[in-house]
Image (tube, rainbow, N blue to C red):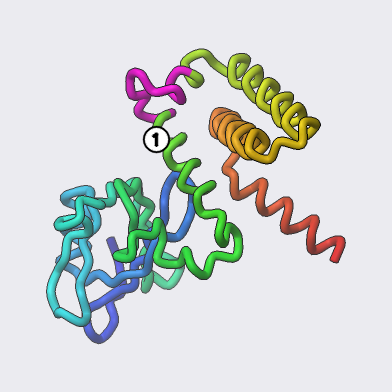
Amino acid sequence: MNVKFDEKGLVPAIIQDAGTKEVLTLAYMNEESLAKTMDTGETWFFSRSRQELWHKGATSGNTQTVVSINYDCDQDAILVMVTPKGPACHTGSVSCFSERSTSLGDYQILQSLEKVILERERERPEGAYTTYLFEKGVDKILKKVGEEAAEVIIAAKNRDHEELRWEAADLLYHLQVLLVEQGLPFKEVLRTLEERHKDRS
């Protein structure tokens, strides 16, 4: 790759989840760590504080499998699309930017759920309920969304908060399965809500 490294021999690398499109972290690479990233198919960085290479997930197991690597128009920044095998942040958060997220905020669990569903669709582990739904197809998923929506209505009519909480969670889960089956990222739904809110505020 024709990358332009700075005077310290480094280039900023933006790490993004290839499935959810969430920006996971910003790190730095030198020529050697970039070469290792391309050779091994997992992310390697250069620590400016320790002045040494480090392999993401070498200790924690939270590695990042590289899907693609691109550089910007000036060739002085890299975008690395990855499939993460765990949290990107040392705090245990999915993203280093999670606490400042304006899209999900406290609702990060919805993003985590989407990631699990995407993995289930891709890997189809035997015995998993989500695998069962994908294998049965869209008609089965639609049926479950309808059933869960009806159960939410019944719980609300019964004024049963405990039942409503459980049924609403089931509905959100099956809705996310449907969105993944349809290839529609959940963030697109959130973006629509944000646009409507701006139009009406």
Q: Residue 37 appears in which quarter of the rendering? A: bottom left
Residue 200 vs residue 45: left or right? right
Q: Position of residue 12 (x, y in %)?
A: 34, 72
- Compare residues 116 and 40 and report the one nearer the observer: 116
Q: Is residue 72 above or below residue 140?
A: below
Q: Position of residue 133 (x, y in %)?
A: 50, 20
Q: Is residue 191 above or below residue 151?
A: below
Q: Residue 196 appears in which quarter of the rendering? A: bottom right
- Residue at the (28%, 72%) spot, across then down: 28
Q: Badge 1: few (under 14), some or many (20 or more) residues near its Cα, within 10 Å?
A: some
- Compare residues 15 and 2 and report the one nearer the observer: 15
Q: Position of residue 152 (x, y in %)?
A: 71, 31
- Residue at the (57%, 57%) spot, across then down: 104
In the image, residue 123 lies in the stretch drawn in magenta: yes
Could one spot residue 71 in this view of the protein? no
- Compare residues 155 and 50 and report the one nearer the observer: 155
Image quarter in which the C terminus is found: bottom right
Q: Amino acid at mark 1?
A: Glu
Q: Position of residue 174 (x, y in %)?
A: 58, 30
- Residue at the (22%, 48%) spot, across then down: 41
Q: Which residues are magenta?
A: 121-132
Q: Residue 88 appears in which quarter of the rendering? A: bottom left
Can you identify the residue that label 1 sits on?
119
In the image, residue 108 lies in the stretch drawn in magenta: no
Residue 168 vs residue 69: left or right? right
Residue 157 vs residue 137: left or right? right
- Residue at the (57%, 62%) spot, across then down: 105
